Image (tube, helix red, strand yellow):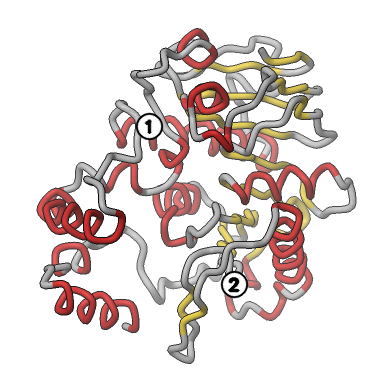
Amino acid sequence: GEYESYATALGEKLDLDFSEILNMKSFSRDGAKVSDTEKFPVVFFTTGDNSSVQKYENLITNTVSHGYIVVGINSPFLSGDNLLPTGHVIKTSKAKNDDLDHNVRSDDIFYIQKNIHKIGQVYDVMILNKLSIIGHSAGANAVAKIIESKDHPFSAAIAMDADVRENFQGFEIPFLHELAATRYWGTKYGAPAARVSFTPKYILKDNNYLVAIVESKDNLLNAHPDGPLYSHHTSFTDVATLLKSEPFQEALPTLEKLVELIFGHPFQSPLGDGDGQEIAAIMNLYVVDFLNFYIKGTKSSIFGSSNCHAIIDKSIASCGPVIFP
C-alpha cells in the first residue's frame, strides 16, 4: 500500500533494495472469520512511543491464540506513522511532554472503550465485563497512570518496562510489571537523560507482581557497565525475533547503509544478548498466565499463590505484598 510505495521510492532514491523487508510475512491475516458460537474477553493494548501496534505481533497474535480479543490502539501522532483507510498517512509527532503523551493516550483508550459497540461484527463476540489492558514503554506509563486514577473500567493490567520512578506505588487491581534486563542498568549507565540518583522501587500490593526477563536478580540490579544484558527495552517488540529472521539478515547490509546515511554511524543492535525467540516466549508465558488467572479464572502456579517463584528459566519473579528490590 502507501508504505510499500514510500519505501520503494526511498530505496530507488538512495539506491537501496528494500524488497526483502517488504516481502516479510507475519502470522496474522486480514478478514479472519469471527466466531458465531463463542465469546472472548477483551484486552486493550497501547504502544510505546513512535511504535505502532504492528510492531507487537509476537505479543498480540499469541494473546489472541489463547482466546482473547486484543484491541490495539495506534494513537495518532504518537504511535508512529498511521495509515488511514482513506490512504492518508498521519505522521508521528513526539508529544511535548510525558503528561501530554499520557493525556492523548488516555483519551484514545477511553474513547475506544466508550465506542467499542461501533466496532462491527467482532463486537458481538466480546466479553466486556472484565476488561484488561497492556502497555509498553510510554504505553506502560499511561497504563500505570490510568490504573492509579481508580476511575477506569479495567480488571487487570500489565505494564511492560515503564519508565522508572523513585517509588512505583502499588495498585488496587491485579497488576503485573514486566521488566527488561536493561531497566536498572539504564538508570546507572544509559543515556544521561535516563540516569537517576536513586534506586527505583516497586511497591507491590496484594495481587501485584514484578517479573524481569533476566538471568538472575543480581544481573538485573548490578549489571556491569559493558553488559552482557540478556534482554532490552525493545525486546518486548517484534524486533527481538525479526533480527535473526532470514529476510532481515538478507536485508541487513541495506539497513546498515541506510543507518549510516541517516545517522552517520554504523548500525548497532538495539537488543540484548539473549535469543529473541526465547525472550518473546518468556514474555508471552507470563502475560497469558496472568490474564488466564485474573480474567478467565484458570489455575496458575505463580499468580494468586503464596508460592512465589519464576515459572521459567531466564526470569525472576517478585510477588506482593513486598517492596522490590
Q: Is residue 201 found left or right of 88 in the rendered image?
A: right
Tell us which disc is closer to us: 1 or 2.
Answer: 2
Q: How many marks?
A: 2
- The residue beneath circle 2 is 76
Q: Is residue 229 found left or right of 7 in the rendered image?
A: right
The Cα–Cα distance between marks 1 and 2, rounded to whole angstroms, is 29 Å
- Of residue 27 and residue 169, the one placed in the foreground of this image is 169
Q: In the displayed structure, would residue 70 be above or below residue 301?
A: below
Q: Residue at x 27, y 41 (%)?
A: 268
Nearest to N terminus: mark 1 or mark 2: 2
Q: In the displayed structure, would residue 180 be above or below residue 225?
A: below
- The residue beneath circle 1 is 279
Q: Is residue 2 found left or right of 298 in the rendered image?
A: left
Can you give x and y, in whole percent of width and height, for residue 250 in the image?
Answer: 10, 53
Q: Residue at x 71, y 34 (%)?
A: 175
Q: Residue furthest front?
A: 264
For disc 1, the neighbor class at 10 Å (few under 14, some 14 to 19, many from 20) is many
- Of residue 299 and residue 205, the one placed in the foreground of this image is 205
Q: Residue at x 63, y 54 (%)?
A: 43
Query: Answer yes or no: do the residues labelled 1 and 2 have beta carbons within 8 Å?
Result: no
Query: Which picture quadrant has residue 174?
Result: top right
- Label 2 SS: loop
Can you give x and y, in whole percent of width and height, for residue 72 in the image?
Answer: 56, 62
Q: Residue at x 87, y 47 (%)?
A: 149
Mark carried by residue 83: none
Instruction: Residue type at mark 1: give it.
Output: Ile
Instruction: Residue type at mark 2: give it.
Output: Pro
